[in-house]
Amino acid sequence: MLIIRLNLFEGIKLKISMETPLTETEVRELNVSDIVYLTGTILTARDKASARILELIKKGKDVPINLTNSVLFHAGPIVKKNEEFELLVIGPTTSARMNKYQPDILKLGVRAIIGKGGMDSNTLKAMRKYGSVYLAATGGCAVILGQKVKRIKKVYWLDLGIPDAIWELEVKDFGPLVVAMDSHGHSLYDDIKVEAEKLLASLF
Amino acid sequence: MAIESGVISNTIFELVKKAVIELPEDVVQALRHAYQKEAHPIAKENLRVILENIQLAKQLSKPICQDTGIPIIFAKLGKKIQVDGNLFDAIAQGIKKATNDNILRPNIVEVLTRKNTGTNTGNQIPIIDIELSNEDYLELTFMPKGGGSENMSAFKMLTPAEGPDGVKKFVLETVINAGGKPCPPTIVGVGLGGTADYSLKLAKKALLRPIGQRNADQNLAKLEESLLKLINETGIGPMGLGGNTTSLDVFIEVADTHVAGLPAAICFLCWAARKATARIYVDNKVKFI
């Protein structure tokens, strides 16, 4: 894990390069506002894939992907089908839709979730318990993030539709990703909401 | 003379391509301005990435965002305009071609079975809004509406007693509740009056206005300005990660309403506020705006 600190952002680790698979120890070293770049393998999983993973596990069946120390990306790409799939662009989707599934999925050893917009308090608690972080990618920046995907390694569950299939991606310097929820119980979204609600209460 | 369906399909295809690849200049300027003004380090970093992404999308001719939305078309039908064939089918044809060419991600599913139609068309999709106009052309605006921002839409029947302050409170509560989910810095559309459904339509149509253009009514213009200031004081910031840039603009559209009610609706556009417009004339000539 390579950490570059700049004086400009006192207290914030500006660029942390990390390689997958991530370990619990290194993930627990991250704090909110740190900025991370990932190299290695990430797996996309949206609503339908999350539901199917949990359904298979509940039935005692095998899941075709290894989730131990993995990174899940809430995203659905635009792809082109030639002989093989070519990824055109990819960016984060709204993570809150996956709130329902996330604690049970984190239990399986997922070390980081990449998404946008943040997740709920149950997910935050699960991140503390199992050692995981929420990494916020810049929503809408699908060209930049797409450029950092080197190739599609494999696709699972295409029957769910292109956005909802699980795409196993090889990435290099994938980021910037802001640690927005850490394994110490901190959430940038919660802090910001508290302040915003104070403003609301002072006005009305 | 009538406008040919093929011309409509081709125009829609070109509008889709333009809209998803290139942001309107007023939006790009507003984002640049926000980047220069922003003091919060994470907010500035997010805005930097956003601006770089806009430039790269244009350079590589790729969609800015992977969520190329639900297709919405705002049509203005001139008084002498006739269409040779079915307008819905002609528009749908252009959308299908854009999906086939990987310009649009297949986003449209059956509402309860969640089965993807694979074409971005389907039961009543694309959504087409038709207004009648006195002009001598058919104007088509394509708006690919992203799911993240659309999911944060809100509607409330306020009481007349709640008045303008009630509207302000409702807008601010909605923005705070949405947080980073609609991909801020957003554009906020507010629709007031009419009926429940009509206020939502007004809120959506408010998003068609270019950034910086105030409502012609002075009181509403002031309300827009004061709402924008308040929204940016919430500290939600780009992507909800903190900062001074939560919205780029607020647009209010109104209609008169029933004496007993004050329907209020809110729609968001994400920072990737995509839209493109063209006019088709009776002689089938097309002008992109």
Image: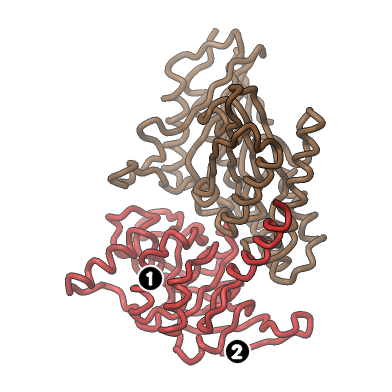
Q: Amino acid at mark 1?
A: Lys
Q: Position of residue B15 (x, y in %)?
A: 58, 35
In the rendered image, the vertical position of residue A51 relative to residue B142, given as above or below: below
Q: Position of residue B29 (x, y in %)?
A: 77, 49
Residue on which the image places disc 1: A153
Categorize mark 1 by other alpha carbons within 10 Å: few (<14), some (14-19), many (20+). few
Note whether residue A21 is visible.
Answer: no
Side of B179 relative to B115 (left or right): right
User: Which callout, 2 or 1, points at the residue further toward the start of the chain?
Assistant: 2
- State which quarter of the image contains the N terminus of chain B: top right
In this figure, what is the number of numbered marks?
A: 2
Q: Which chain is red?
A: A
Residue on which the image places disc 2: A2
Chain letter for mark 2, please. A
Residue positioned 80% across, 38% down in the render: B222
Q: What is the C-alpha distance between the residues marked 2 and 1?
A: 25 Å
Q: Position of residue B250 (x, y in %)?
A: 71, 43
Chain letter for mark 1, please. A
Q: Which residue lies most toward the bottom here?
A: A25
Categorize mark 2 by other alpha carbons within 10 Å: few (<14), some (14-19), many (20+). few
| Apparent colour of chain B | brown
Residue positioned 53% across, 80% down in the render: A185
Q: Secondary structure at mark 1?
A: strand
